[in-house]
Amino acid sequence: MKDIYRVIKRPLFTEKGSSLKESENKILVEVSMDANKIEIKEAAESIFKVKVEKVATIKVFGKWKRHGKSLGKRSDRKKALITIKQCEKLDFIEGV
């Protein structure tokens, strides 16, 4: 098994992610490109101390960007949408 902190890189704080968290009890995190759903579920349960119901993954491919004459590409990344059971609650920035 991989290190759980290498599977889940960081939580994503976006407007859509916060509305999903409030309405459907889902959290949005950035994960490693080679992580699968089982590893993501185990890592989320051990890091956040919640019961995970379902995991959905999304691959986001990097865009090509121009900086003057040169052309560069942003890196690819993978996101996971983790559904937490209804009885569980998770607050990232509670008390800040």
Image: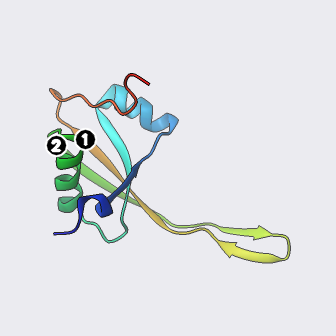
Placement of the N terminus among the 4 image quadrants:
bottom left
Q: Residue furthest bottom?
A: 70
Please count the marks in the image. Answer: 2
Q: In the rendered image, which residue does mark 1 sit on?
A: 83
Q: Position of residue 4 (x, y in %)?
A: 24, 59
Residue found at the very far front of the displayed protein = 96
Chosen colour scheme:
rainbow
Query: Circle 1: is it few (<14), some (14-19), or many (20+) Cα within 10 Å?
Result: many
Q: Amino acid at mark 1?
A: Thr
At 18% from the left edge and 40% from the top edge, which residue is drawn? Answer: 49
Q: Position of residue 48 (x, y in %)?
A: 24, 42
Q: Is residue 23 above or below residue 83?
A: above
Tag 2's secondary structure? strand
Give the residue at mark 2.
53
In the visual, does 4 lie left or right of 20? left
From the viewer's side, name the closer residue of 90 and 61: 90
Most extreme residue toward the right is: 68
